[in-house]
Structure formats: structure tokens, C-alpha cells
Image: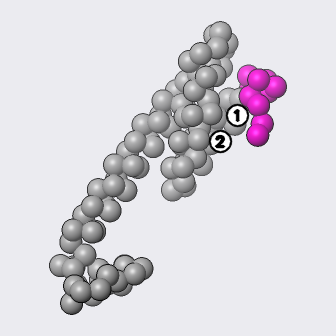
Amino acid sequence: MVTLAKKSPEQRLNICRKYYLAGFLFLPFLWLINAIWFYKQAFRVEPYPEQTQIRKYVIRSAIGTVIWLIIIIAWNITFQLLRTKIGPIGDFLTFVIPRGYY
């Protein structure tokens, strides 16, 4: 794994920005990685000029991760509770159909 301590502040900001933007391509896992990986650089080290931008990306990545988790959990609960009521579409979306429901 690449250590951020060996990177220049500009390179850290560039990497953080790329992870943040890639999260918008339906890859919220990258937002989680971005928030965890850059947390120390955003909040724990001595201040440097790029830190405010990195902090902004880390906070937004964490918020995006939480929003995606809420959406995924809500969809999962809704689908599991209403799969049989949806009808054929629910069966089509189901990878493994449980026995005993029809």
C-alpha cells in the first residue's frame, strides 16, 4: 500500500480528489476508502495549505458513504419484506428463490 507520508501535499490532494470523484461513478466503496485513508491527513497532522481541500473531500466522502449505506439498507429491507407482493418482478430480481412461499 502506498504511504501518504512519502507523497507531496499536491499529490495527496490529487489522489483524494480522484477517489472522491470516482465515488460518483456508483462506486461508494471508494468514498469509504477515501474517508478512512485520508482521515489522518485531514484532521491529525500539522496544517498545510492543501489540508482544507482534503478535509472537504474526506467529509463529503464520509457523508456520501453514509447516504449510500442508508439507501442500500432501505432497499434490502423493502425488497425482503415485499418480494412476494411484487409478483414476477420480485422473482426476476431474486437470485435464489426461497422454498415454501408459493
Instruction: Answer whether residue 63 is visible to the viewer in this image.
Output: yes
Q: Residues within 10 Å of mark 2 (few under 14, many from 20)?
A: some
Tell whether position 61 is magenta.
Answer: no
In 3D space, how far apart are the residues under numbered discs 1 and 2 (Cα atoms)?
A: 6 Å
Q: Which residue is mark 1?
A: 14
Amino acid type for the residue under numbered disc 1: Asn
Q: Residue at x 21, y 68 (%)?
A: 81
Front position in the image: 81 or 49? 81
Q: Residue at x 78, y 36 (%)?
A: 2
Q: Are marks 1 and 2 in contact (CB under 8 Å)?
A: yes
Position above or below: 4 against 30: above
Q: Residue extending furthest front?
A: 100
Mark 1 secondary-structure assignment: helix
Instruction: Answer whether residue 53 is visible to the viewer in this image.
Output: no
Mark 2 secondary-structure assignment: helix
Q: Residue at x 40, y 81 (%)?
A: 96
Q: Which residue is mark 2?
A: 18
Q: Give, as a single range, the part of the protein colored magenta.
A: 1-11
Image quadrant where one finds the C terminus:
bottom left
Q: Residue extending furthest right?
A: 6
Amino acid type for the residue under numbered disc 2: Lys
Front position in the image: 99 or 64? 99
Residue 31 at x, y percent in the picture: 54, 43
Image-quadrant location for residue 94 = bottom left
**For this view, does 55 lie left or right of residue 86?**
right
Q: Residues within 10 Å of mark 1 (few under 14, many from 20)?
A: some
